[in-house]
Image: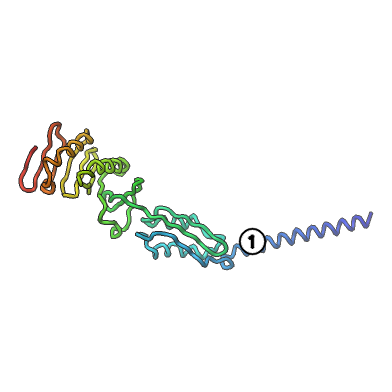
């Protein structure tokens, strides 16, 4: 009986030592993982078009996070930092064992300038980049911010209607009172008003070849807000139709 108890006692000690050893290894391993110097991020791969996003700006935002090491880098914080770059639309950041940080950036693709100093994408996302990075060849929308989706829809439909006349909208305005007006690449400004917008645009399209023809650039303003006609202001002299 004494021998049995002694053997059991030795087994208990062995088990305790084994558990203690495992705990020591676990703690040592955890401590090792906590040290960013043991698993540094030494390879950073950035995939982007860099059409408008400045590489130096990306590097400046990424660099502070590299000191956190492979296991502790705050990827969500890094994403938020990169999304603060005005032209950055989407960020995907991931770690690749043992020392690599992969970053993929997608830039906003603007379809128009919006109000003062802003741009808008085809999805209705409005952003404000540095003034010197704004493209010059985009149409300009003026509208209340909450109406941006409607302006995008109207611009697309109006552009399709005028395309076969060789006319292009360079400016589209929706006033706070919901009145529509656009400007063409020949300098002509066309007022459609609040109601019967598509009927008035269709009428403008129908009369354009006969009334304006090659004189489109001579018309300053065309007012379509009449039930049976229109008013035209010419560069040389006023003229009503």
Relative to 198, is 93 on the left or the right? right
Q: Residue 71: in sight, yes or no?
A: yes
In the rendered image, which quarter contains the N terminus? bottom right
Q: Pick whichever, 173 or 50, lies toward us.
A: 50
Q: Residue at x 43, y 64 (%)?
A: 59
Instruction: Tell me the residue that label 1 is attached to.
Output: 30
- Compared with 180, 78 (above or below) is below
Q: Residue at x 26, y 47 (%)?
A: 141
Q: Residue at x 36, y 46 (%)?
A: 123
User: How many numbered marks are there?
Assistant: 1
Q: Position of residue 186 (x, y in %)?
A: 16, 49
Relative to 133, is 197 on the left or the right? left
Q: What colour scheme was applied to this rendering of the protein?
A: rainbow
- Compared with 169, 53 (above or below) is below
Q: Residue 175: in sight, yes or no?
A: no
In the rendered image, which quarter contains the C terminus? top left
Res 177 → quadrant: top left
**Residue at the right extreme, as displayed:** 1
Classify 10 Å Cα crowding around label 1: few (below 14), some (14-19), many (20 and above): few
Q: Position of residue 74 (x, y in %)?
A: 51, 58
């Amino acid at each position: 009986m004494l021998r049995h108890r002694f053997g059991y006692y030795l087994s208990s000690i062995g088990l305790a030592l084994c558990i203690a050893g495992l705990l020591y290894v676990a703690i040592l391993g955890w401590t090792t993982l906590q040290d960013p110097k043991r698993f540094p991020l030494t390879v950073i791969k950035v995939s982007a078009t860099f059409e408008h996003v400045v590489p130096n700006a990306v590097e400046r935002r990424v660099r502070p996070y590299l000191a956190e090491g492979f296991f502790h880098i705050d990827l969500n914080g890094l994403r938020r930092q990169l999304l603060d770059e005005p032209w950055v639309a989407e960020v995907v950041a991931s770690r690749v064992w043992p020392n690599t940080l992969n970053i993929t950036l997608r830039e906003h693709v603007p379809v128009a300038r919006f109000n003062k100093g802003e741009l808008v994408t085809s999805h209705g996302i409005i952003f404000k980049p540095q003034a010197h990075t704004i493209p010059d060849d985009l149409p300009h929308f003026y509208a209340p911010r909450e109406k941006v989706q409607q302006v995008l829809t109207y611009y697309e439909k109006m552009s399709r209607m005028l395309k076969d006349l060789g006319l292009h909208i360079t400016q589209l305005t929706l006033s706070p009172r919901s009145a529509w007006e656009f400007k063409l690449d020949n300098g002509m400004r066309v007022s459609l008003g609040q109601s019967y917008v598509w009927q008035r645009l269709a009428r403008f399209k129908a009369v354009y070849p006969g009334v304006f023809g090659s004189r489109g650039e001579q018309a300053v303003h065309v007012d379509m807000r009449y039930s049976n006609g229109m008013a035209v202001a010419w560069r040389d002299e006023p003229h009503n139709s």
